[in-house]
């Protein structure tokens, strides 16, 4: 069965987002909730997770595990989105309406990922 192009688009999305954690770490540190310990480590860990999970989507053998990992990661990332809503500094000047729209977007991304689970 041929792999759909949009699966690769999702993989690239997560790989690029993960690499951005290492190119722009200050941006990610600013949005890291203050109540979480070891923020630099968590920024790096989330970047590595996004890259690894994005790469995992590209291979049938690891696809299901990567999909479940992405869904779990997006659930965890909800804490960041809520934190950005509650902190003016973390919001980084992004309009509140965009911050609010990012929350349902997380669920759209979860649904998109779930669509690639193989029986």
Image (spheres, rainbow, N blue to C red):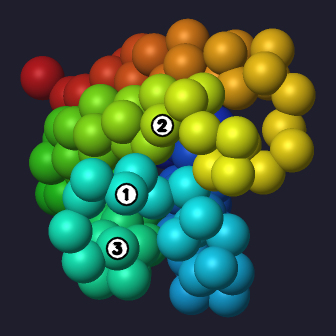
Q: Quadrant of residue 118?
A: top left
The reply, left or right, for residue 111 in relation to residue 24 is left
The earlier-in-sequence mark between 2 and 1 is 1
The reply, left or right, for residue 7 in relation to residue 50 is right
Q: Quadrant of residue 30?
A: bottom right
Residue 92 locus on image (x, y percent): 78, 51
Identify the residue at image location x=87%, y=28%. Answer: 95
The earlier-in-sequence mark between 1 and 3 is 1
Q: CA distance from mark 3 to mark 2?
A: 14 Å
The earlier-in-sequence mark between 3 and 2 is 3
Q: CA distance from mark 2 to mark 1?
A: 9 Å
Residue tagged 2? 83
Q: CA distance from mark 1 to mark 3?
A: 8 Å
Q: Which residue occupies the foreground of this view, 78 or 113?
A: 78
Residue tagged 1? 34
Res. 35 in view = yes
Q: Are marks 2 and 1 in contact (CB under 8 Å)?
A: yes
Identify the residue at image location x=25%, y=58%. Answer: 36
Residue tagged 3? 39
Q: Is residue 92 above or below residue 87?
A: below
The reply, left or right, for residue 38 in relation to residue 93 is left
The reply, left or right, for residue 36 in relation to residue 95 is left
Identify the residue at image location x=48%, y=37%. Answer: 83
Which callout, 1 or 3, points to the residue nearer the camera? 1
SS for tag 2? helix
Residue 6 locus on image (x, y percent): 63, 37
Badge 3 crowding class, 10 Å Cα cut-off, few under 14, some 14 to 19, many 20 or more, is some
Q: Quadrant of the C terminus?
A: top left
Q: Is residue 43 above or below residue 31?
A: below
Identify the residue at image location x=36%, y=66%. Answer: 46
Q: Are marks 3 and 2 in contact (CB under 8 Å)?
A: no
């Amino acid at each position: 069965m041929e792999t759909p192009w949009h699966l690769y688009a999702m993989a690239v999305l997560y790989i690029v987002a993960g690499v951005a954690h290492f190119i722009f770490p200050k941006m990610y540190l600013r949005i890291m909730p203050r109540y979480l310990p070891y923020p630099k480590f968590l920024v790096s860990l989330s970047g590595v997770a996004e890259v690894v999970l994005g790469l995992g989507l590209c291979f049938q053998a690891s696809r299901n595990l990567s999909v479940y990992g992405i869904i779990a990661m997006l659930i965890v990332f909800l804490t960041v989105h809520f934190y950005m809503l509650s902190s003016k500094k973390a919001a980084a000047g992004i309009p509140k309406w965009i911050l609010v729209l990012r929350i349902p977007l997380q669920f759209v991304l979860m649904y998109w990922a779930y669509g690639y689970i193989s029986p």
